[in-house]
Image (cartoon, rainbow, N blue to C red):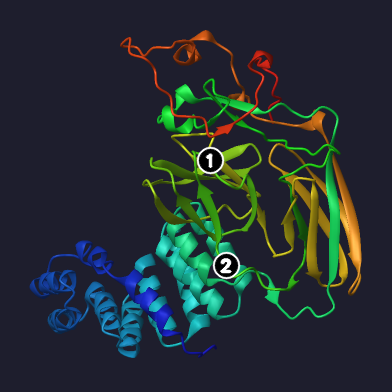
Amino acid sequence: MNTSIIPKKLIFLFATFGAGLLVTFLMAGPVGAGSDSLRKAQKLSQAGDWAGAVVEFRKALKTDPSNSLAQANLGVALSRIDKHREALLAFQKALEMGYDSANFRYFRGLSLARLGLLEDAAREIETALKMDSRMVRADYDLGIIYHQLGQDDKAREQVKILYKRNTKLAKKLFDQIPLDYTIISVDNGGTLKGKVNLTGKVPEPRAFHLIHAPNIEYCSRMSDGKGHRILYDFKTSESGGLENTVIAIQGVKKGKPFPRKMQSLHLHLCHADKYVIGIKNGENILVENTDPIKHEIATYEIYGSHRNQTSNISILPENSQVRSAFVKHDAPEFILKCNLHPFLQTRGYIISNPYFAVTDENGRFTIPDIPPGTYEVTAWHPFIPVLKGTVTIHAEQEAELKFTFKGENARRKLYHNDTKGYRFNTWYDSDVTFYGEPRVDDPVEVLQNFDNSKRYEGNLKPF
């Protein structure tokens, strides 16, 4: 039996999640001898006067010693004033009297946990969840107990369960379980260098009609000058080097620490300064909006053909906020984009260790301080299937790895397709406004080269 003491922070969480559930017992109680005391106890417990509720439950039991419901509630009330030994005695009497329920088992498990009897507490809350699997707070507390027992694999399973039903509790539990990665000193690490190339025809950029979004005058400051914002998904150098590809070494369980500085995104001219990033699950990212307009920043997780929005919060003009890249446990991709201005987007690849890099404008990358060993390496770009390679890192030596994507394998969803149509371009075809006044546009600060005549429909291959 584990008798370790639970940290005060976790005790507080148990106490918080136990609050308010007492009423469910009382509402189900029979009316009879001692019912006046039960009603008083209910009002006192609703008011948070647990000590007073203990007195009234004891009065009810003195009037009717066979009232198992009052006995069970006495245990709950005693637990709320931190008299857990007495609570466990009351719980045991209630069990002997034939009372049982999922909530009852849950509260009993919390008292066991508060006394440091973690293995018994885990078994009790497991029993509660078998009786009623809908108890998300019990799932959370069970994950905390597993973590305290050193059973982090089981705790992570609780995160998966919670993610399907309550992402806030899932994130709270996730944040308390360490990543499956150990920080060590790497004194004899090696270095991986390489290059990513794209062969064949470079896929055409995506063009977004600015007339579809608000703040058209301001956002057109970065455009082709004719009403289009261009996204260059595939940026290549003269030698074919592919920019914005995340190179990640897989399976590194021990090594250097993650960067201490929080990653940041700078929003300017309705544009994010980073097109792709590598980011670990649950990591926070600072989003800075220097535009004089509001952006509605949404986050998405992508796994397979699924794309789920996980949050949507507005960022006021010239303001900033911290967002989280918390995604489903097996989701490999993360997107942060503006739902008002869909061309403002950053795409992330979920990494499990700090050994990753993003290719530069020449398609080159460098990853230093790698512990010696043989590893799988992945090359990820948002719109083309992942490439994999294998590399052996020797102490204090350089290794080289090259990846070659084929332009013909590019995949982009059909709803990103640019459709040519006269009704989308009338705003830029006229020198006057709808009311006949001279049209005055904001000056174009960043002119994007785009051959509008080559736009056509249906050229983007879906996933």
Pick the front one: 195 or 64: 195
Q: Which residue is drawn at 79% across and 55% down?
A: 365
**Residue 99 in view here:** no
Residue position for label 2: 261
Percent x, y of residue 247: 76, 53
Secondary structure beneath disc 2? loop
Pick the front one: 443 or 65: 443
Snapshot quadrant of residue 226: top right
Q: Disc 2 marks which amino acid?
A: Lys
Say which quadrant the C terminus sits in: top right
Secondary structure beneath disc 1? loop
Residue position for label 1: 271
Percent x, y of residue 175: 52, 67
Percent x, y of residue 407: 80, 31
Q: Which residue is drawn at 45% across and 44% down?
A: 297
Indicate left or right for 104 with 421 as reference.
Answer: left
Q: How crowded is mark 1: few (under 14 residues within 10 Å), some or many (20 or more)?
A: many
First along the sequence among labels 1 and 2 = 2
Q: In this view, does 370 lie above or below 120?
A: above
Q: Disc 1 marks which amino acid?
A: His
Give me the C-alpha separation between circle 1 and circle 2.
22 Å
Indicate left or right for 379 with 5 as reference.
Answer: right
Q: Residue at x 56, y 53 (%)?
A: 327
